[in-house]
Amino acid sequence: MTIQTKRPLGLIAATAFFTAFAAAGALADSAGATFSDGEKFTEKTGEAIYSNLCQACHMSEGQGAVGAGKYPALAKNENLESSGYPVYIVLHGQKGMPPVGEMLSDEQVAAVVNYVRTHFGNDYKDEVTVEEVTGAR
């Protein structure tokens, strides 16, 4: 082998190494992700449901986003004061928000609504009950 043929092989080896290294980092970042089974979400807590279902659009701090669509901020959102409003939206959807009620139990809906209403600068302490969610279906 001449020097000219060693350089392209070295470049290929370096590229393969860095690609594998980057892929390992990407997998490490997703290590905390939870995957649900089938058509139902398996997360139990409001925080886990928010992290795995809602956060992709409404962002990690509930700040919302604008891009391919408009995802309203949940942070300091006065619309969440009435507990029936977020329950209805989660169950039935509205505009760009898909209805996710079929994928969540009544307990899960109550948990995620209560989580959002008590986090991100929201301080609505009247908890949504499972019975209220059942009645809203």
Image: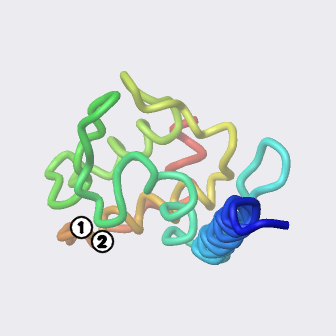
Tell me: 77 left or right of 114. left
What coloring was used for the rendering?
A: rainbow
Residue 22, which numbered label? none
Which residue is denoted by mark 1 in the rendering? 124
Residue at 70% x, 69% y is 10
Near mark 1 (Cα within 10 A), the count class, few <14, some 14-19 or many ≥20, is some
Q: Decide which of 60, 137 is in the foreground and name it.
A: 60
Which residue is denoted by mark 2 in the rendering? 118
* Marked residue nearer the N-terminal end (2 or 1): 2
Tell me: 124 left or right of 98. left
Task: Find residue 4 and report its horizontal and vertical position in percent.
Answer: 69, 61
Tell me: 116 left or right of 132. left
Which of discs 2 and 1 lies nearer the camera? The answer is: 2
Task: Find residue 120 and report its horizontal and vertical position in percent.
Answer: 24, 69
Residue at 55% x, 41% y is 135
Amino acid carrying label 1: it is Tyr
The answer to whether the residue labelled 2 contacts the one labelled 1, judged by CB atoms less than 8 Å apart, is: yes
Residue at 43% x, 45% y is 87
